[in-house]
Image (cartoon, rainbow, N blue to C red):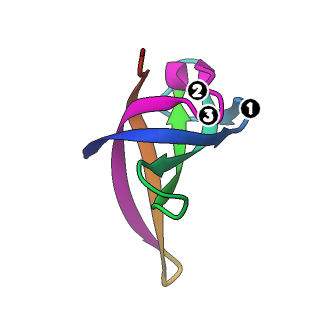
Amino acid sequence: METKILKVVKQGEAFMVDSQKAEGGKLAKCNILLQEMGGKYENQYAASMLGNLAQLKFYPGELVVATLRFQSREYNGQVFQDILVTDVEKLRM
């Protein structure tokens, strides 16, 4: 896991997905695009927020402190990488 100060590029709307781990079988999910601090062409991360984190709303340009978990898996001979936001807080200035 890695914790960084990042800038929000954009955030999608929360939607419900099936989950065997969630009570009731449904879990909120939201996608967010985060960018490292610096210039216009810094690294960006397309990440997912789950559960209560998916209900949070961030706006483009806001600074956040986020902990990201990187994981990869193989499926049908292809490797996929997922980035999950495990903790996020808006920076107050």
Crowding near pointer 3: few (<14 within 10 Å), some, many (20+)? many
Q: Which residues are magenta?
A: 51-74
Q: Amino acid at mark 3?
A: Lys
| Residue plotted at (70% across, 29% down) | 14
- Dot 2 and dot 3 residues touching (CB under 8 Å): yes
Q: Which mark is residue 13?
A: 1
Crowding near pointer 2: few (<14 within 10 Å), some, many (20+)? many
Using the numbered discs, state the Cα–Cα distance from disc 2 to disc 1 in whole angstroms. 8 Å
**Where does the image place residue 55, in percent across and percent down from the top left?**
61, 19
Q: Amino acid at mark 2?
A: Ala
Q: Is residue 76 left or right of residue 5?
A: right
Label 2: element kind: helix
| Residue plotted at (71% across, 38% down) | 12
Q: Is residue 41 left or right of residue 14?
A: left
Residue 81 among those drawn in magenta: no
Number of numbered discs: 3
User: For residue 90, which quarter of the picture?
Assistant: top left
**Where does the image place residue 25, in percent across and percent down from the top left?**
60, 26
Is tag 2's residue or tag 1's residue first in the polypeptide sequence?
1
Which of the two residues, 4 or 29, is positioned nearer the viewer here?
4
Q: Which mark is residue 54?
A: 2
Residue with the mark numbered 3: 29
